[in-house]
Amino acid sequence: MTSPQRSSGENDAYTRGLDAGRIEQRLQGHDDHFEKINGSIDEMTQALQNLTDELRSNVSKFSADVTSDRRDAGEREKIAVTVAAALVEKATNVREEKTQRWTALQRLFAVLGAVMLIANFTLAIYLTLNR
């Protein structure tokens, strides 16, 4: 089969048509590539949005934990102050009880008791040795 003879004007038109087809094909390739890039950018944008939401959630949780710890620390400090005050009061009461002084009558009975004890002990020894 022989190809029909074309004139130079037809040849130029044919060549332009081939070039336009190649250009159209290249443009279509570029369009496909840009669609892939846009899809990738959309996926990255969604992934970044998800990470941002997760980060905000974690920051909120951390902030709540810190606030709770501060409140707990404040309550622990109040409890410690209350316990310390109670212990100081108890120690003061014990000290007051220990520093209670004997009256003169109590001292007299203590001295008389000690003298009687020594006298009885001495008498017991004397009687034991003289038998």
Image: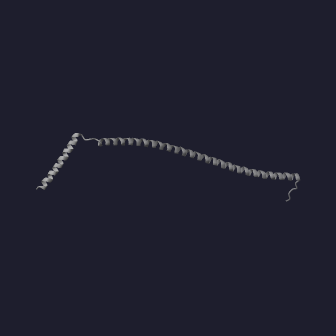
* Depth check, front residue: 4 or 12: 12
Q: Residue at coordinates 54% horizontally, 45% vertically from top-left? A: 59
Q: Position of residue 109 (x, y in %)?
A: 20, 43
Q: Residue at coordinates 32% horizontally, 42% vertically from top-left? A: 95
Vertical order, 17 against 82 (above or below): below
Q: Residue at coordinates 66% horizontally, 48% vertically from top-left? A: 41
Q: Position of residue 70 (x, y in %)?
A: 48, 43
Q: Residue at coordinates 59% horizontally, 47% vertically from top-left? A: 51
Report the number of discs: 0
Q: Position of residue 89 (x, y in %)?
A: 35, 40
Vertical order, 121 against 78 (above or below): below
Q: Position of residue 68 (x, y in %)?
A: 48, 43
Image quarter hosting the N terminus: bottom right
Q: Quadrant of residue 96?
A: top left
Question: Relative to residue 127, is residue 80 drawn left or right?
Answer: right
Question: Relative to residue 106, is residue 61 drawn left or right?
Answer: right
